[in-house]
Image (cartoon, rainbow, N blue to C red):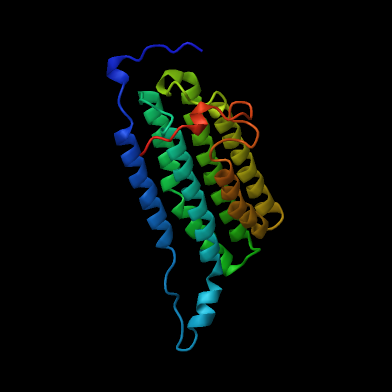
Amino acid sequence: MPRSPLHGFSRSDTSRAEAFSDGVLAIAVTLLALGLADPPHRPGGLGHALLAQWPAYLGYLASFGYVSVIWLNHHQAFVRIRVMDRGLHAANLLLLFTTAALSFPTAVVADALRADTAGSDARVAVALYAGLAAAMCLSWVAFYHQLARRPEVLKADVEAAYVRHGRLRSWAGALAYGAAGVLGVFVTPLLAIAVFVVLPVFYFATSEGLPKGRDGGHTGERDRAPRPVG
């Protein structure tokens, strides 16, 4: 596909976007850790109180895993991007907007599950988490759409299937989180939590592409070359 020239006023390097993004993702992880606190307890009851807040640990595990693979996939994207334009900046900010909000539904889910693992509040809470997580996946769809629309922002040696695989993975995540929310509401919230914990593993395993498919399943010079630092 021919690469159209970038206009000077719309072009910038990636360093500021990467630095800002790393800062936002670091803060997002820190906010998740703030949800782990010393629980109120009577003398001699600390062990029971710590065990009773297991939903907070599970929520932290699911959300930390999610933010971690977002950081990893974000890095994998930016080693392939040579310059930023306004549309790509907007897509990146949308991604950070959804990521930074993840601590909110994580805390809501933990509180609701502590009260009643099968109650209506827990069902609403997992639906809220699933909705935000799906929105985060859709923000990746927008990010990859911008890369597909403006291939000139990518480096010349990027794998031919990279953007297509990224879009497929993002749509798969949005559908999976949506389905988890439905299962959590109509079956049991704990089933949704299980999906929330497992999905980041999928994104980690496919952070460099789907199993059969960087460049049609063949390893090219781009894959053997050293990755840029940063």
Q: Position of residue 134 (x, y in %)?
A: 56, 42
Say above or below: 33 vs 183. Answer: below
Q: Residue at x 60, y 32 (%)?
A: 168
In the displayed structure image, the side of residue 197 where residue 42 appears, left or right: left
Task: Return the residue nearer the eye: 127 or 215.
Answer: 215
Q: Residue at x 42, y 18 (%)?
A: 152
Q: Position of residue 46 (x, y in %)?
A: 48, 82
Say above or below: 187 vs 159. Answer: below
- Quarter holding the C terminus? top left
Count how many numbered circles sit on residues in the image.
Answer: 0
Question: Please, which residue is most extreme toward the left here?
Answer: 9
Q: Quadrant of residue 113?
A: bottom right
Say above or below: 81 vs 97. Answer: above
Task: Return the residue nearer the eye: 118 or 130.
Answer: 130
**Residue 131 appears in view:** no
Q: Position of residue 62 (x, y in %)?
A: 54, 55
In the displayed structure image, the side of residue 169 where residue 150 appears, left or right: left
Q: Position of residue 109 (x, y in %)?
A: 54, 59
**Residue 178 appears in view:** yes
Q: Residue at x 36, y 41 (%)?
A: 21
Task: Return the residue nearer the eye: 158 or 185.
Answer: 158
Question: Please, which residue is most extreme toward the bottom here?
Answer: 44
